[in-house]
Image: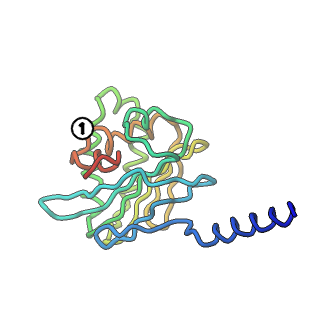
Amino acid sequence: MKSKKTFFTAWFLGLTALCLPASQALDIHGVNFPDQVQLENSGLILNGTATRTVWGLKVYVVGLFLSDRCHNCETIMSEHTLPKRVLISMLRKVSVDKFGSTIQENIDNNFSEAEKVKYRKELDAFLACFGNGTDLDSGSAVTIDFVPSKGMVVGVNDHQFEPIQGDEFYHAMLRLWIGEPLQKSIKEGLLGKAG
């Protein structure tokens, strides 16, 4: 009798698992934005999203993915052992030069001169990912991942760049979105505090 009950319990749980979707897509300004992603061997969940606007025009949707939800920027930036992803999904075409110059402006806003010297090699490698002359079209995706065994891994659409090694650099770069971003609502959204 006990084995029969165990069998039906296992069967029911298995059937339930099959019925549950592995991941849902959120509709954000017409973009199917995932609420979960797989990074290497880790499943990450969406911590929050925000929309970058310039002069009232929606430019891109950005999301922050973590192992567990967290609303404290200092905790996120000081945790160096778990993977993370910043996902940017473009809502309109932006020249890669403009995208790069905006990133540079954001770096200037978040890094001291001493830090720019300290991370010069890493910053050059990061900015080089957006210096190939290919514009970012509407629908383009940029991923900025932290993989503990590799460091920062940047992807633009289907192309993945060589890893930029080091744990500290990635977490310093998170300031661009959850430190002092060019748009305050970016930080609030990614920390799940918007609305």
Instruction: Between residue 54 and residue 13, name the one nearer to us.
Output: 13
Q: Viewed as shown, does residue 180 lie left or right of 68? A: left
Q: Nearer the viewer, residue 84 or 172?
A: 84
Residue 148: percent from left, percent from top: 58, 42
Label 1 neighbour load within 10 Å: few <14, some 14-19, many 20+: some
Q: Report whether 1 appears left or right of 43.
A: right
| Secondary-structure class at tag 1 | helix
The residue sitting at 38% across, 41% down in the picture is 71
The residue at the point 39 percent across, 71 percent down is: 32
Seen from the viewer's position, the closer of residues 144 and 96 is 144
Visual colour scheme = rainbow
Farthest residue, direction top: 114
* Residue 134 position in % (x across, y down): 35, 67
Q: Residue 152: where, in percent of width, then height?
A: 49, 46
- Taking 48 as reference, is 173 above or below it? above
Q: Quadrant of residue 61?
A: bottom left
**Which residue does the numbered mark 1 point to in the structure image?**
109
| Residue 186 vertical placement versus 92 (above, below) | above
Eyeballing the image, is 34 above or below 66?
below
